[in-house]
Every structure is written in C-alpha cells, then in structure tokens.
Amino acid sequence: MDTDRMIGDEVARRVLTAALSHGGDLAEIYVEDRCTTNLSLEDSKVEEAVRGTDRGAGVRVFYGSLSTYAHTDDLSGRSLQAVARNAALAAQGANRVQVLDFSRAQSGLEFPIEKPFEAMEAQEKSQLLRDLDQEARRFDPRVVQVQARYSEDRRRIRIWNSEGRHAEDERNLIQLSVIAMAQEGDLVQRGVGMIGGQLGLELLDRVDPLAEAREAAASAVKMLDARPAPAGEMPVVMNNGWGGVLFHEACGHALEADFINQGVSVFTGRVGEQVASPLITLVDDATLPERRGSYRFDDDGTPSQHTLLIENGVLREYMWDMAQARRANRHPTGNGRRQSFRYLPMPRMTNTFIKAGESDPEDIVRSVQRGLYVKMLGGGQADTARGDFVFSVSEGYLIEDGRLTAPIRGASLIGNGPEVLKEIEMVGHDLELDKGLGQCSKGQQVPVSVGQPTLLIPRITVGGTSEIP
Ligand SMILES: [Zn+2]
C-alpha cells in the first residue's frame, strides 16, 4: 500500500484520542484512496477518458447504540483532529475509554492481480472499444447502434478503531460492457454483453471481449423476431446467473439487519422458521475470489465471511454491520459497507446467491407444458422490506411442450419475493454467478454479485404485452 497517501498508526491514535475526548465508548477512523478511469464509446467514437481520484477520511464515535460521524477530504493531521473533535462533541457525557495499541489484522484471503491496470496504455483500451463496435456491427447489418464502456476502479482503505482494530484492504474492479441496438422498420431491440470482476487486465486475456460484442448483437437481432409476450399466471423457468438479481432485490434486502432492527422486514423475528422451499439455500459470501462483492475486511474493519442466510428453506441469519449488531447485541457478519468515506456504513449484501440443487436444467424446461423461459432480466423495482417486485424480461422464450420455442418481448414478472421462494419446485445443478457488473443502490452505491441455478417457479404473474406494435 502506498503509505504516503494514507495516514499511519500515530496519526490514527491521536485522532481516536481526540474523538473520545468528550466520552463515547468506541471511536473509529476510516481512510480511503480511490482512483477510477472510465472510457465510453458511442456513434463509433470514443469519448475522452474520464479519470478521477478521491481521497478522504471519516471519524465515527459510538456512545451506546448511537453514533456520530464527520468526514473530510483533507488528510492533514490538523484537519483530521478537527473532524475528530466534531464527531466527539455529540458524544458528551458518555463513559471514557482509552485508545488501545493497534495490531494489524491479517486476512488469509488472496485476491491477486496478475496484470495491473497500468499494463495497458489508454489508447489500447480505446482501441478495444472500437473493436467491440466493429465486431457488433459486422455481425448483422441490422445492428445500427453500439455503445461500449470500459472502467477500472482501485480503492484502498484503512480502518483503525479504539478497540485496537487495524485493518487494510485493496479492491480492484474492472468492467467492460457492450450494448447493441438492432433495427427493422420501426422496431428496435437491444442486446447486452459484459464481463467484469475483482481482478486486473488478465480478465481480457481469459475471456474474449469480441465474443461479448457478438453475443450482444446476436441477442438484439434475435429479439427482432420476438412475439408479444403472453400474459397471465404461468410457470416460469429462470435461467442461471443474473436471474439472482430478483432474489437480491426481493429477498436479500429484507435480510439486512437495519430492516430487521426497524421491524419492517417480512423476515423480522423469524430465525429458525421455514421461510422458503426446502430446496432453497441462500448464502451471502464476501470471501469469493474475483467477485465484485468480495473483500478481506468490510468497511467497519470486520473480516469478511460466508453467511448462510437460508438453509434448506429455514431462516438462519441476517446480514449485520457493526452499528446494527451493537444495537441488537449480536456479532457483525462483515456486511458493513459504504459508498465512500462520505457515508456511514450500513448492512449490505456482498455476493448473494442461491446454491445449486440437483435437477438437470433440461429436465426443468421439459417439465413445463406451456410457460415462459427467462434468459435475461432487465430493470426492475422491488419493495425491499416486503419483497413485492416487478421485473422486465429483456430476453425470454416461450416454452411449449417442454421445449424452448419463439422469442418473446414485452414480458414482465410480477410477484412477491418471499412467496416465490416458498413456491420454487425445481433447482438446477448449474449455479452460476452474474458476469461481473452488479451494482446495488440502497441510498449508497456498492458493487455486488448475484447468482442462482436454473429454477422452476410453478406460478407467477407475467404481465404487459402493452408494447404490441
Ligand atoms: Zn440491491
């Protein structure tokens, strides 16, 4: 870690001492140094690279279950002391504690970067976007527009607290995406290709980015022949991978400890109860290599972990950050995350997925007489505490007599996440996580992964053929 741009143990100790000068039972300093580069292409032209750096620190003081927070983008000793005094003021009157010695926490997790972002010149990255554009247009003359984006994000953090915790982490994210628009008459359809994750430029050697451009073009062109979606209740087979976003939005958020403590979640007070089909095991795991939601320590400095949320349908655990865990007298599960030093951490998902089952994905499709096969979900909305959702289907097919037939367009799925979890009848053995561009917004943006095996939902409302031309 580049220590010049961060602060050291001595400064941290002085800041924490100042933060506790009016009392309080725990103080913490969080320091962050981040650089990002974004490149985008539209109309076959690459826009100028947008580079950004962001550096700063926040000081938090707990007194009982309450806390105060102040932050600055000036890492000088004087500025940090002032921030600490600000955070301290609100903690007046509480018991005083001493700042302990720091011993740096060790993590056994490795997220190695084989090829750092600097290993490729900016021009080469721009050329890659132009190649994607060409490849998608070459695929079919009906591809009329292409957008491509490349981004890299390096974030280094350090956390010290007055209990002697000292944790450091470095997170490197890369992503590349291509959207192809195909047109026939007035009808325009889009297809998407993407790759990404927590790794370096070796991603571009491992996966052929041009194949993603062809995939985007192929899916846009295929959807030109799509029929309007049927509406009503029917069985739905969800493809493995990105479909997990539905459960992230419609079930995962309701398992975050802030909603639990507030008592607004459908899952409040239900640990030990059967809340899902016995076929469903749902986990949140921030220790997986190469995934966007992974880290060694969360933004409270708690080591990351694998958390069993629902096991064979039985609710086992919620996702806790430090603040919510203190409130409920529980142990944090390493789910404290923040968008940047300007924000307080809150309980967030990391890499959240339904574990593989035993069914053959082809048997799952074969079991359906007439229904909908969802290959790719588009945008969606969900009530995070109750789990009601509407998601659009960006690529879907009819299932007729156990076989995939015509592509359909304009379908949406309407339902309730916890209800769907109870009804799932078949779970494939083909667990896959998303392709590495997941982003969760719950007031703050954080990178996440989602995933699932192929699933059979026996009944769900499919809505909206309103876009029939
Ligand atoms: Zn989310």
Image (tube, rainbow, N blue to C red):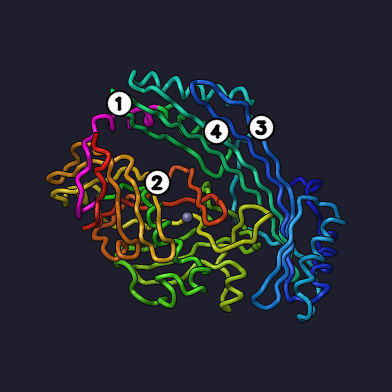
Q: Give the residue at mark 1.
A: 186
Q: Give the residue at mark 3.
A: 118
Quadrant of the frame with the C terminus: top left
Q: Give the residue at mark 4.
A: 150
Q: Dot 1 lies on which element?
A: loop
Q: Dot 4 lies on which element?
A: strand
Q: CA distance from mark 1 to mark 4?
A: 30 Å
Would residue 131 appear left or right of 169 to someone viewing this image?
A: left
Crowding near the residue tagged with mark 2, few <14, some 14–19, many ≥20 C-alpha atoms within 10 Å: few
Would residue 183 appear left or right of 23 to someone viewing this image?
A: left
Q: Give the magenta range.
A: 214-236
Tell me which residue sits at (38%, 47%) in the image.
241
Q: CA distance from mark 1 to mark 2?
A: 23 Å
Crowding near the residue tagged with mark 4, few <14, some 14–19, many ≥20 C-alpha atoms within 10 Å: many
Tell me which residue sits at (78%, 70%) in the image.
88
Q: Give the residue at mark 2.
A: 379
Identified by mark 2, the residue type is Gly
Q: Residue furthest right?
A: 78
Q: Dot 3 lies on which element?
A: helix
Would residue 215 appear left or right of 65 to someone viewing this image?
A: left
Q: CA distance from mark 3 to mark 2?
A: 34 Å
Q: Are marks 4 and 2 in contact (CB under 8 Å)?
A: no
Crowding near the residue tagged with mark 1, few <14, some 14–19, many ≥20 C-alpha atoms within 10 Å: few
Mark 4 or 2: the one toward you: 2
